[in-house]
Amino acid sequence: MLEGRYLVLIEDDPVMGASLVQRLELEGAELTWVRQAVRGISAVRTPRKPVDAVICDIRLPDGTGEEILATVSRTIAPPPFLFITGQGEIEQAVRLLRAGGTDYMTKPFEMAQFLRRLAQIFRPGSETGLPPQTGISPLARQVDALVAEFAAHDRPVLIQGQRGLGKQRIARRIHDLSDRRAAPFVALNAYRDPPAAADLARAFEQARDGTLFLHGVSRLDRAGQEALALALPAAAFRLVASSGPAIDRRAEAGDFRADLLYVLLANVIPLPPLAQRTEDAVWLAGQLFDALNGRRDTPLRGISELARAAIRAHDWPGNGRELRSRLMRAMEVATGEWLFPADVFPEMVEGEAEIGSLAEARDAAERRQIIRALDRTGGQIAEAARLLRVSRTTLWEKMHRLGLSAR
């Protein structure tokens, strides 16, 4: 019944948890069982493979199911949540459904009924059946699954993530997989030149019956936001927009219409940076190498294992755009049959004479990790401290010493 499904169980009761794990594994599911809210957030937000559903108790020793759903939803489109609740928590369970939860069951319950309710909440199309497009990591495969799912309907989609992750390419894939594929795909780049209301009106007309990709939707001025909000309810086109991670903070500051943001957040594709999925950096390097190598008069033999290790270890602040740029340069200057670390990262050679102390290396590593945690939590110190497994005071002290701020 559950063959091939990957589930996250968040339940602190050892008897209830063990019983559910035993039965769900008998049904063919693969599970991760955690007993704390903080571990549940991590298991759902950075899973080892795409999550088909989350089974979550509402009351946990260090938090609630409501807090888990709210925290996860700030950075990704959450998988379906089935909440388990006591009789006195039904009002909270109903509130959770309004916030985006999928279903709830009251204790005690019959296992057969539980399995039926669980089977009903799985998203259609969670298995794409397609070769990897974004990457091979669980996070990348989750992106591919969302692309296939959202291509099946016409509602607005928001692609959210840092620069250099190929948002337009993903928008194009949604269009090509949809029923609108024969109609125009119109791209408007608000990052490069924020469009006036008249420019938007022309783009609406050009994209009629097709897809309008609005790159950098958060850069629209008030007039542009109003024009888009008025056009969407009766639009003939399908909107796919993109933004950086800070669009919600712009809305909180009054710089972006909250009603328009809520429409976009209903269907979000979160793009994790390459720093969080190093296996995808190596995979993408291989894809780019094959494409570029075919254009050379004398093809190279490949990317050496040393270069692959260096690619895996790099932080990739410029994401895929930086990777492509480095690989193109490396293939132009390579003198041997293989790409080596110095070809991809020439600064490694330039900086050979200067070797910092272990303390400097440790500070640099801590600084990178703290920045990642703050970026993932939207600058929330307490939540970042939980991810880093240190106290809030310790995190504040380290940030002060390293010259970091939450914003």
Image (cartoon, rainbow, N blue to C red):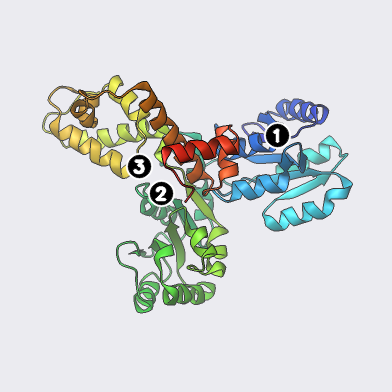
Q: Which residue is mark 1?
A: 36
Q: Earlier in the sequence, mark 2 or mark 1?
A: 1
Neighbours of disc 1 within 10 Å: few (<14), some (14-19), many (20+): some
Is residue 305 visible to the viewer in this orientation of the structure?
Answer: yes
Q: Quadrant of residue 244?
A: bottom left
Name the residue located 59 percent from the left edge and 39 percent from the top edge: 392
Give above or below for 342 relative to 159: above
Residue 140, position as x, y percentages in the image: 46, 39
Neighbours of disc 2 within 10 Å: few (<14), some (14-19), many (20+): many
Find residue 162 and name its label: 2
Given residues 356 and 9, the one toward you in this image is 356
Name the residue located 50 percent from the left edge and 72 percent from the top edge: 232
Find residue 319 and name its label: 3
Q: Earlier in the sequence, mark 3 or mark 2?
A: 2
Q: CA distance from mark 3 to mark 2?
A: 8 Å
Neighbours of disc 3 within 10 Å: few (<14), some (14-19), many (20+): some
Name the residue located 41 percent from the left edge and 26 percent from the top edge: 362
Q: Earlier in the sequence, mark 1 or mark 3?
A: 1
Amino acid of disc 1: Gln
Label 3 secondary element: helix
